[in-house]
Amino acid sequence: MQFLAGDIGGTNGHVALMRSADDGSGALEMLAYGVYPCASFASLDDLLRHFIGTEVRARVSHCVLACAGQVKDDEVLNDNLAWPVRLPALRGTLDLAEVAVLNDFEALAYAIEGPLAATGRHLCGPPARAAGPALLVGPGTGLGAAILMPGPNGGVALTTEAGQMDFAPHSLREREVVSWLAPRGGYVPVEHIVSGPGLLTVYEALCALDGDVASLTTPKAVTAAAATMSDSHAVEAVALFCAALGSFTGNLAMTCMPTGGVFLAGGFLSSIFDLLKASAFETRFLHGRSVRELLEPLSVWVTEHGSHGVYGAARWYVNRHRRARAANAHEVCA
């Protein structure tokens, strides 16, 4: 079976033509692959049509999409996507027999037991993973998280919207940033600080709090200035970001005790790996008191996002079809 598999984030869309083996093994082969800036297309339909026209050049009738957000009533709910994603429109305009959708970090979780884990860079904790659940966290355009519970056929991934949880400031400086973001109080989600846009927001907040004018205008410029130590507010912004990421990841780890490893995903984190390594991430991840002894045995890795979301989505899709065929066969036999 050939099908489209896509990993659609707030910034880029990763799309592939996949083929699954006919022998029931679930083996996957990538026949074509492309990465496209979402802002370059008027809709998801246009992005997929461009990929089909330039890379596939043949009719494709089945598609699986890993999208930032959650599906409700045939629509993906997420403020970080470049455009609305409505499944009936996709099926109609692209003449697809089926469009299956799952959360983008849910898809990444299904890729943990493949090359995603093998290509990771060790950040802290033991250098080897143990058996058990695995936690995936990724700041990018937004902040995603998922949990992989071990089991047959790659286990079961549990999707979350953890990035929408309330941000809990740890230091006085973080409280000042939150007060700048919400001067009248109210809800401040974690992803407004722990994400690419959040890093820029923190930088702007620190400049404003110190009475300075922000001169950097992109998250990439902030990380570059922090790496060269050419802007003191950029250095502080990255340090605050890394520390806040540590607290957030540690909080999630306490909910599922991921003895199978903690994976921080995305090119954004890979680009600041040295800064992350030297930051207060580990201290804040471990928290303190008795819980420290529970979190110290957890292995933490930084891994590239790349095509792993596409592979994870394809693996989930093929396994779903295998289960459906097995159920149909059981009904026929019964």
Image (cartoon, rainbow, N blue to C red):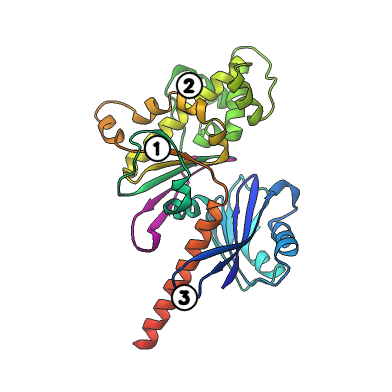
> Residue at image x 69%, y 27%?
217
SS at circle 1:
strand
> Residue 197 at what x, y percent from top left?
61, 34
> Residue at image x 56%, y 73%?
1
Q: Which residue lies furthest to the bottom in this view?
A: 333
Instruction: Tell me the number on the disc at residue 300.
Output: 1
Mark 3, residue position? 23
> Residue at image x 49%, y 35%?
190
Task: For label 2, count other residues whose C-alpha is less than 10 Å away and answer few (under 14), some (14-19) or many (20+).
Answer: few
Magenta span: 141-164
Is 144 one of the magenta-colored residues? yes
Question: Is there CB contact under 8 Å for labels 2 and 1?
Answer: no
**Which one is in front in this view, the residue at disc 2 or the one at disc 3?**
3
Q: How far apart are marks 2 and 3 (CA)?
A: 57 Å
Can residue 205 be seen at all in this image of the molecule?
Answer: no
SS at circle 3:
loop
Sooner in the amino-acid sequence: mark 1 or mark 3: 3
> Residue 95 at what x, y percent from top left?
69, 72
**Which one is in front in this view, the residue at disc 2 or the one at disc 1?**
1
Sooner in the amino-acid sequence: mark 2 or mark 1: 2
